[in-house]
Image (spheres, rainbow, N blue to C red):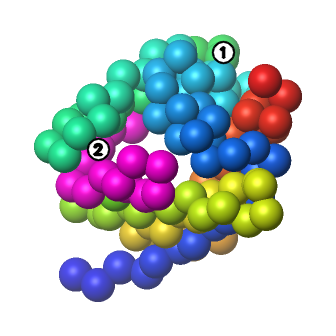
Amino acid sequence: MKRDKIIIQAIVSADIEKIWSYYTRPEHITKWNFASDDWQCPHASNDMQVGGKYLARMEAKDGSFGFDFEAVYHQIIVGERFSYTMPDGREVQVTFNDVDGKTEVSISFDAETENSIELQRQGWQAILGNFKKYTERN
């Protein structure tokens, strides 16, 4: 089945080494991996190797809804890019590019079929925006 690709991006005021660490280490992931302030990511684990598993618990702070976001890595080039596949077969590629001492983070992902393309784009962009804010403040 052919899926639509969605691409989101952000320029983050930090070097690639810091970006890579903050994007991939669980102690940082739990601080930014949610789309709005009424959500949280209370737990994350990340076995950053080909065949390794990524898992992040995402849930509403009021306990009304939550889910586990999980994936398995199939490509990793440290400091440059990685890609993974979610259990439903959708693929995600994350790339990091130096832009005059800042880092462009670009995420390309296969759309799912339950929610509109725009809603998915907005949700993933909001999470990337939280990553940008967290990384630039710390």
Q: Can residue 136 be seen in this view?
A: yes
Q: Would you say the magenta stretch is mainly helix, strand or loop?
A: strand
- In this figure, which residue is indicated by the disc labeled 2? 71
**Direction from residue 36 to residue 22 in the image, left or right:** left
Residue 132 placement (x, y as % from top left): 75, 43
**Direction from residue 105 to residue 45 in the image, left or right:** left
The N terminus - image quarter: bottom left
**Direction from residue 3 to residue 30 in the image, left or right:** right
- The residue drawn where x is 25% and y is 48% is 73
Above or below, 119 relative to 46: below
- Three-letter code for the amino acid on which mark 1 is drawn: Asp
Residue 69 placement (x, y as % from top left): 39, 37
Determine which of the numbered discs, if any, sits on residue 129 in the image. Answer: none
Element under disc 2? strand
Q: Is residue 122 visible?
A: no
Extent of the magenta region: 65-82
